[in-house]
Amino acid sequence: MKCEQVRDLLDAYALGAAEADEANAIEEHVADCVRCWSSLSEAQRAAASIALSTAFQRAPQSLRNRILDEAQRGERRVAPNLLQLARRLMPVGAGVVAAGAAASLGFAIFLQTEVSDLRSDNNQLVAEIETADARLSQQQQLLTVLSAPDFQQITLEARDPTSPSTAVYQWSDSGGTAALLCNNLASLQQGQVYQVWLITEVDSYSAGSFQTWDGIGQLSMDLDDLPEHPIAIGVSIEDTDGAVEPGEMFLFAEFQQ
Amino acid sequence: MNVSSSDSDYAELGDEELMQRLHHRDQRAFEAIFDRYGDLVYSTALRVLRDTQLAEDVSQEIFVRLWRKPQSYVAERGRFLTWLISVTRNRAVDEVRSRGRRQRHETASPEEQERELPASDSIDPALNAQLAEQARIVRAALAELPPEQREIIELAYFGGLTQQEISDRLDQPLGTVKTRIRLGMQKLRAALAPQIRSEQI
C-alpha cells in the first residue's frame, strides 16, 4: 500500500473502523514509514479525544472499592523465611524439560473417552458428565499449551522425598495459558482444597485452587492473570475458601532465571 | 520514593510519575490514578456498552490489569491518557462484539452532555478541571461538524462499527461513509491541533 492510500485510511483506522485487511496493510506500512506513523499517531490522539465528549458519569464507589481491594489482595508479601525455608527443603535442579507432553496428551484422550462412556450411561450420571465435561474443557486448554511452539514445563518436587505426589507446571507465552497437573495426591479432608501459588521476588499470588479425583488434580490458568517473571511455584493445602498467604507448600519448584 | 507523601502530594504528580511508582507497586499511586481517571474510564465503557454492570466489569478489568502489568503502558509511545482511553474503548468494543450487542447507539448532544458533567468534587479538582476543559474543547469541535459527519464518527468510535457496517446500517454508499469520516476527522484534527501539539491530548 502506498503512502497516499494509507493516509486516506488512517482516520478510519484510528477510529477502529477500518476493515481487517485494510488494518493489516496500514500496520505493515507504518512499521516502515515514519511520516505515515506520525500521521497515524496524530489521528489516534484525535480519535481518543472523542471519548472526552461523552457524558461523564461518576464511577460507583463500590467499583473503586473492588478495584483497590483487588490491588491489595495481589500485594500479599511472602514472609522471606518462607521462600528460604522452601529453598532449603527442595533439591535445586527442577528445571525446564521438554518430555512429558506425550503423556499429557494421552491423559486428555483418556478423558475424552471417559466423557463418551459417561454419555452412554443413564441419567443418574448427568452430574458426573458435567464434571467430566468441565475436566475435558480443562484438557482442551491444556492442549493449547502443549501444542504451542514455545511450550515449556517445569517439574515440581515433593517436599517429602517419600511422597508419591508428582506435579508438572506447563505454560506457553504465545498461547497465554498455563496448567498445573498433579498425580498421586493425597485425599483431601472435607473443607480443604489444593491451592497453587506463584511467587515473585516480593509477593505470592494465588493462582487458584482445585480438588482431586482419584489422586489426580489439575488447574488451568490464564497467564494474563498471573504475575510476570515468577521465581517459584508451589502447592499447599488450604481451607475451601482459599488462603490469603500460602501455608506449608508440599510441592515446589524454582524457575530457571 | 518518598513513602510518606500525603494524598494531596500524589494528586499533584503527573501521570508518568504515577505510572513510574506503579512499577514499584505503590498502591497510593494506583489509587491516585483511579481517582483521576476512574470516572472517564467508566463513562467511556458505559457509553460503548450501554450497561452499567458491563461498564463496571470492563473498568475493573482495565484497572486491575494496569496494576498487575504497568509495563503494558510504554511512555515513549504516547501520552498515558490517550493510551488509557484507547485501551478502554477497544476493550469495551470487543465486549460489544463478543456479545453481539449491536444496538443502535444514540448520541447525546454536547449540550446534553455538558449538563450531565458532574460537579468536580473529587480529591483532585485541578486535574478534573483540566479534563473538563479538554472535554469542553472536544465537544465544541464535534459540535462544529456537520451532523452527518459527527454521526458516522460516533458510530465508528462508540458503536465499534467498521465503515462497511456503518454503510449497511445507515444505508449509505461506502464511498460516502469513507468521505465523511475523512472530512470529519480532518476538521476534528484541525480544531484539536493546539491540544495535540502541546501534548494535552
Image (spheres, rainbow, N blue to C red):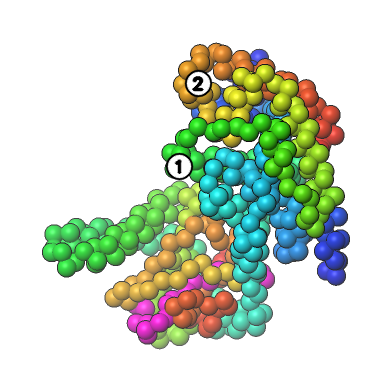
Report the residue at 83% width, 52% height from top: B125
Report the residue at 50% width, 21% height from top: B170
In space, the residues marked 1 and 2 are separated at their CA atoms by 22 Å
Q: Is residue B137 above or below residue A80?
A: above
Picture coordinates of residue B25, whole percent (x, y): 72, 64
Q: Amino acid at mark 1?
A: Ser
Region in magenta: A182-203
Q: Is residue A30 above or below residue A114?
A: above
Whether discs 1 and 2 lie on one chain: the answer is yes
Using the image, name the chain to which the residue with label 1 belongs. Answer: B
Which residue position holds label 2?
Answer: B170
Q: Nearer the viewer, residue A86 or B197?
A: B197
Picture coordinates of residue A226, whole percent (x, y): 56, 61
1 vs 2, front mark:
2
Q: Secondary structure at mark 1?
A: helix
Which residue position holds label 1?
Answer: B98
* Placement of the C terminus of chain B among the 4 image quadrants: top right
